[in-house]
Image: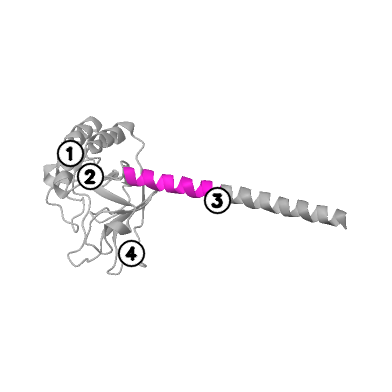
Amino acid sequence: MQHKFKCLSAFIILICLVSGCSNDSTTKKETQQKSETKQAKAEEIQVSDKEKDELKEKLLIYADQYGKDKGMAISNRYFSSSDYTQGDGYALTEDGELQITNHNKPGKKAFKVHNIVGISAYYSKNNVKGIDKQAQDLTNIQGYNEVADMNKPITKYLFADNGKVYQYEFTQNEDVTLSTGFADKDYNGKDPNLKPNVAFTEVKDKDIVQKWKKLLSKYKS
């Protein structure tokens, strides 16, 4: 009888130890998750429309020189949607859905990442290098046919509020328009038939990334 009691006591102690370890592990995991959430919130950058315009202007100065160095034309005409569209325009990235336009359907809070500035880079059919003023009035119907050599790639860049830059290079075999690579949410935030057909990936060019981080750092709260 005494032997059985000792075995039962040992079993109860073992259960308590296992339970304690499990609780410690859960607590550590919860603490880590809270820490990561706080860190993400701390890194979130809020910019006003005026500040977005300032960032766009500064970035285009850099992009102009970048295009000249690479022998490519640069335009801030990278996105367009129908006048009848109600939902927010967005793109897919490695970090989730990235909001391009905000019509409050579903609104900023529904997206993990938000775009601040966007540009497109292409080889000009008119031998333009740097900012292409001829692209200012492009429509979605025209696409890039009016200004770009469609036999060469067209790259769209998205400069986001998380400090990252995303890109997608469309090949010469694709009919690229301003809306290519994006989609719009429908009125209730769901998009069963409107998923973007491509996913933007993080830019590896250190010069571009560092320039964007430097510009964006001035607006950190």
Q: Find residue 26 and report its horizontal and vertical position in percent.
A: 55, 50
- Give the residue pinned by disc 2: 119
Gap in angstroms between the C-alphas marked 1 and 2: 8 Å
Are circles 1 and 2 on residues that touch, CB within 8 Å? yes
Q: Amino acid at mark 4?
A: Leu
- Give the residue pinned by disc 4: 194
Q: Find residue 76 and report its horizontal and vertical position in percent.
A: 18, 45
Quadrant for the C terminus in the image: top left
SS label for mark 1: helix
- Give the residue pinned by disc 1: 60
Label located before the other in sequence (2 or 4): 2
Are circles 2 and 3 on residues that touch, CB within 8 Å? no
Q: Amino acid at mark 1?
A: Leu
Residue at 26 percent of width and 58 percent of height: 89
Q: How is the image coloured?
A: one colour
Are circles 3 and 4 on residues that touch, CB within 8 Å? no
SS label for mark 3: helix
Q: Does the magenta run of residues contain 36?
A: yes
Circle number at residue 26? 3
Q: Does the magenta run of residues contain 5?
A: no
Give the camera-side residue of 165 and 7: 7
Query: Which segment is the magenta one?
Result: 25-42
Gap in angstroms between the C-alphas marked 3 and 4: 39 Å
Residue at 42 percent of width and 44 percent of height: 35
Are circles 4 and 1 on residues that touch, CB within 8 Å? no
Label located before the other in sequence (3 or 1): 3
Could you say which quadrant of the image residue 86 lies in?
Answer: bottom left
